[in-house]
């Protein structure tokens, strides 16, 4: 992928394993729970208002992270349940799957959380999430018109993400 | 799929877009010069440079994390090492070293022998209180704040004032874990 400056984004995008638009939704949250981005491609059932939906998603992930860290059988040091952990510390969960969808999650140490909901047969999306994080850095973080902590309204970023997700398996 | 190993500073520096070093130095010099003209007070300029650095740091940290693939540092010692070896190398092309750890491991000094910001620079007599590289202390403070560490960064030695190296002291005040909002 070529940019204004002409560099390649690393890691280079993983080869798509199947064609077709089969991702359902993408959420990006920052460390304070603000929903920076919500993209929707295929969501037949909507039950909550967008604000409630975002809050639910953020709360779900926060609790899941906490729970998975506490249940870790290999870690020696565990805080009590409910004690907040630094992002990235301890074990981190990366996906869960139900019979109708798969939710993939990635969190950077700076607290940026990326969530991608796809169909259940999707493989490991960690590299893809990393690539989307790189896109976020290039189009949003480096954008002087963007104030950190506010929802993203950069059309170019939205278009690039849509294009990339469409090519995912 | 195995997680990707963190890249070394050299490898990333080779892969990012670079600008001409003189252009960078002269642009920074022009910024400081303009601030001195606008604000006149040396202390004000120091504070403004720190604030500008802070704003840069909060964005820089995401780029750093995305390009370098480092995972969460276990303690402050590792953090300081990563800043000096990978961070400085990636963004300025120079490697810094970390020394002077205190007994608790919360304060250290980052030593820069080579600093591209100060090439060709001399401080005139009426600006002796100026911390020319104060933007760097703001950047480190801003970046560390985004990874939940509140720090204080001060300059101990400054080559423009006659010392032999640049030494900045980074003190960890508090590690602030993520609170549910």
Image (tube, coloured by chain):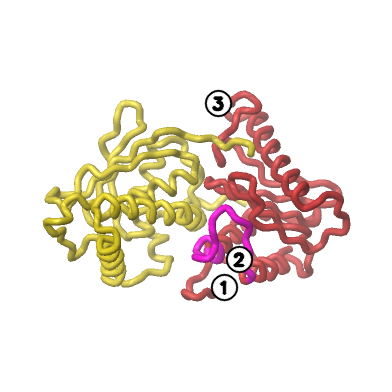
Chain colours: A red, B yellow
- Chain letter of the residue carrying label 1: A
Pinpoint residue A150: horizontal percent, then vertical percent: 60, 55
| Left or right of residue B127, residue A26 in this image | right
Residue extending furthest toward the top: A80
| Disc marking residue A77 | 3
Q: Earlier in the sequence, mark 2 or mark 1?
A: 1
Would you call the spot at circle 1 few (<14 residues within 10 Å), some (14-19), or many (20 or more)?
few
* Residue range highlighted in magenta: A138-155
| Left or right of residue A116, residue A76 in this image | left
Q: Does the rendering let one see residue B144?
A: yes
Q: Earlier in the sequence, mark 3 or mark 2?
A: 2
Q: Earlier in the sequence, mark 3 or mark 1?
A: 1
| Residue closest to the eye, B61 or B36 | B36
Instruction: State how far apart marks 2 and 1 are (Cα).
Output: 8 Å
| Left or right of residue B54, residue B34 in this image | left
Pinpoint residue A53: horizontal percent, then vertical percent: 77, 48
């Amino acid at each position: 992928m070529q940019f204004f400056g002409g560099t390649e984004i690393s890691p280079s995008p993983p080869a798509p394993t199947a064609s077709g638009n089969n991702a359902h939704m993408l959420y990006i949250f920052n460390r304070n729970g603000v929903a920076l981005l919500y993209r929707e491609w295929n969501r037949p059932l909507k039950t909550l208002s967008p604000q409630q939906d975002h809050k639910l998603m953020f709360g779900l992930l926060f609790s899941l992270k906490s729970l998975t860290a506490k249940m870790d059988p290999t870690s020696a040091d565990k805080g009590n349940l409910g004690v907040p952990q630094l992002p990235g510390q301890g074990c981190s969960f990366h996906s869960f799957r139900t019979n109708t969808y798969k939710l993939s999650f990635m969190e950077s140490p700076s607290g940026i959380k990326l969530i991608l909901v796809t169909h259940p047969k999707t493989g490991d999306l960690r590299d893809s999430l990393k690539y989307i994080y790189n896109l976020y850095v290039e189009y949003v973080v480096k954008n002087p018109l963007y104030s950190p902590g506010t929802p993203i309204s950069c059309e170019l970023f939205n278009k690039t993400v849509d294009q990339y997700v469409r090519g995912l398996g | 799929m195995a997680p990707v190993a963190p890249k070394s500073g050299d490898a990333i520096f080779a892969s990012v877009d670079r600008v001409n070093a003189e252009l960078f130095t002269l642009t920074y010099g022009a910024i400081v010069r303009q601030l001195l003209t606008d604000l006149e007070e040396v202390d004000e300029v120091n504070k403004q440079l720190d604030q500008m650095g802070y704003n840069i740091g909060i964005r820089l940290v995401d780029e750093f994390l995305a390009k370098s693939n480092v995972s969460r540092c276990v303690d402050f010692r590792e953090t300081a090492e990563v800043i000096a070896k990978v961070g400085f190398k990636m963004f300025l092309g120079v490697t810094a070293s970390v020394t002077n750890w205190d007994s608790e491991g919360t304060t250290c000094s980052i030593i820069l022998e080579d600093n591209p910001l100060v090439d060709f620079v001399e401080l005139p007599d009426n600006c002796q209180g100026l911390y020319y590289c104060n933007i760097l202390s703001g950047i480190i403070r801003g970046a560390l704040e985004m990874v939940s560490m509140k720090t204080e960064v001060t300059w101990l030695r400054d080559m423009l004032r006659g010392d032999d190296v640049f030494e900045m002291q980074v003190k960890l005040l508090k590690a602030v874990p993520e609170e549910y909002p």
